[in-house]
Image (cartoon, grey):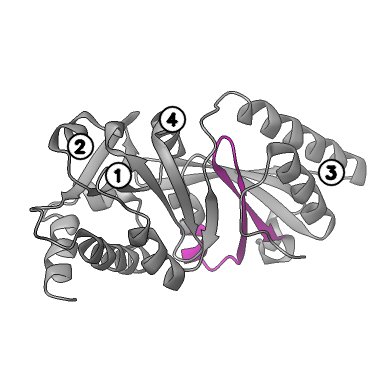
């Protein structure tokens, strides 16, 4: 089946998930982009669809790609716990049990998605090569790039969102926001590239501002984005680790970017 490259309304996403299930796919929902990226690292072939409002990705994996010992899996819930992910597979025995699980999943998804709403913005699913050009080109003097693994943190941005990109592989969610998304950014009044993730229930921030108006910030952001892609493609870790790692992975990315690495 074909997978859309733009976001869907909740009911459209539910219908596509149901079609995918009938064609042999298992839906996966999560609170963290890292957990889906972790599945990519483990070698699972993931397809992605994105709900438009609130913005949320849903993964689908072919059932035959899952471990045989699991048995019949109807859907999977994955939650980030510290620097790891906890998987909960919902199983079924008979066909009627499978249909009941699918019905429960759809109802849960609709109920969950109705709790958070924000201003609707363009959402694109892009490959890495396209993202490297499209994301920095979307930044203006009064906006910031925010790469995040946490859906809860992104939903807190709410009406400050301008545009959202879901990069397919390595999986990364990147938002273009107004500077008012953060008091420090708003006070500095400079374009910024920030990394945000959930840490113990609060949103942890890292990244860098344009150091001076003489700097071509779009080119700097492009180099930083390429460096971030290399890090998350190599290290199977959440962005929380990238922000907090002693010796600062962010500083390393910035320094390599400045040298053209």
- The residue that mark 4 highlights is 159
Quadrant location of the C terminus in the rendered image? bottom left
- The residue that mark 3 highlights is 98
Q: Nearer the viewer, mark 3 or mark 2?
A: 2
In this picture, is 13 found above or below 251?
Answer: above
Mark 1 residue crowding within 10 angstroms, few (<14) / some (14–19) / many (20+): many
Instruction: Give the CA distance from mark 4 to mark 1.
Output: 13 Å
- The residue that mark 1 highlights is 143
Instruction: Give the CA distance from mark 1 to mark 3.
Output: 46 Å
In this picture, is 196 found above or below 187?
Answer: below
Label 4 vs 1, first from the N-terminus? 1
Quadrant position of residue 75: top right
Q: Secondary structure at mark 4?
A: helix
Label 3 vs 2, first from the N-terminus? 3
Indicate which disc residue 156 carries. none
The percent coordinates of residue 224 (x first, y second) are: 24, 63
Label 1 vs 3, first from the N-terminus? 3
Mark 2 residue crowding within 10 angstroms, few (<14) / some (14–19) / many (20+): many
Residue lying at 46% horizontally and 59% vertically, measured from the top left: 171
119 horizontally vs 248: left or right = right
Residue 44 on the magenta span: yes
Mark 3 residue crowding within 10 angstroms, few (<14) / some (14–19) / many (20+): some
Label 4 vs 3, first from the N-terminus? 3
Residue lying at 15% horizontally and 70% vertically, measured from the top left: 256
The magenta-colored residue range is 38-62
Label 1 vs 2, first from the N-terminus? 1
Instruction: Give the CA distance from mark 4 to mark 3.
Output: 38 Å
């Amino acid at each position: 089946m074909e997978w859309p490259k733009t976001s869907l309304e909740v009911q459209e996403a539910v219908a596509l998930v149901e079609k995918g299930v009938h064609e042999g796919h298992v839906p996966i929902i999560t609170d963290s982009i890292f957990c889906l990226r972790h599945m990519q690292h483990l070698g699972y072939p993931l397809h992605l669809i994105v709900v438009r409002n609130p913005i949320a990705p849903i993964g689908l994996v072919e059932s035959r790609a899952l471990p045989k010992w699991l048995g019949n899996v109807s859907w999977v819930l994955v939650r980030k716990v510290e620097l790891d992910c906890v998987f909960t597979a919902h199983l079924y025995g008979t066909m009627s049990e499978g249909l009941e699980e699918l019905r429960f999943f759809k109802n849960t998804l609709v109920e969950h998605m109705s709790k958070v709403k924000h201003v609707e913005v363009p959402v694109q699913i892009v490959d890495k090569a396209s993202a490297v050009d499209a994301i920095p080109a979307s930044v203006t003097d009064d906006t910031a790039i925010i790469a995040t693994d946490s859906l809860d943190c992104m939903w807190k941005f709410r009406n400050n969102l301008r545009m959202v990109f879901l990069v397919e592989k390595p999986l990364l969610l990147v938002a273009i926001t107004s500077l008012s998304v953060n008091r420090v950014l708003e006070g500095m009044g400079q374009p910024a590239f920030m990394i945000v993730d959930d840490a113990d229930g609060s949103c942890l921030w890292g990244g860098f501002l344009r150091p001076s108006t003489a700097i071509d910030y779009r080119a700097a952001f492009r180099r930083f984005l390429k460096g971030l892609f290399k890090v998350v493609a190599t290290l199977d870790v959440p962005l929380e680790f990238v922000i907090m790692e002693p010796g600062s992975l962010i500083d390393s990315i910035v320094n390599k970017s400045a040298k053209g690495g």
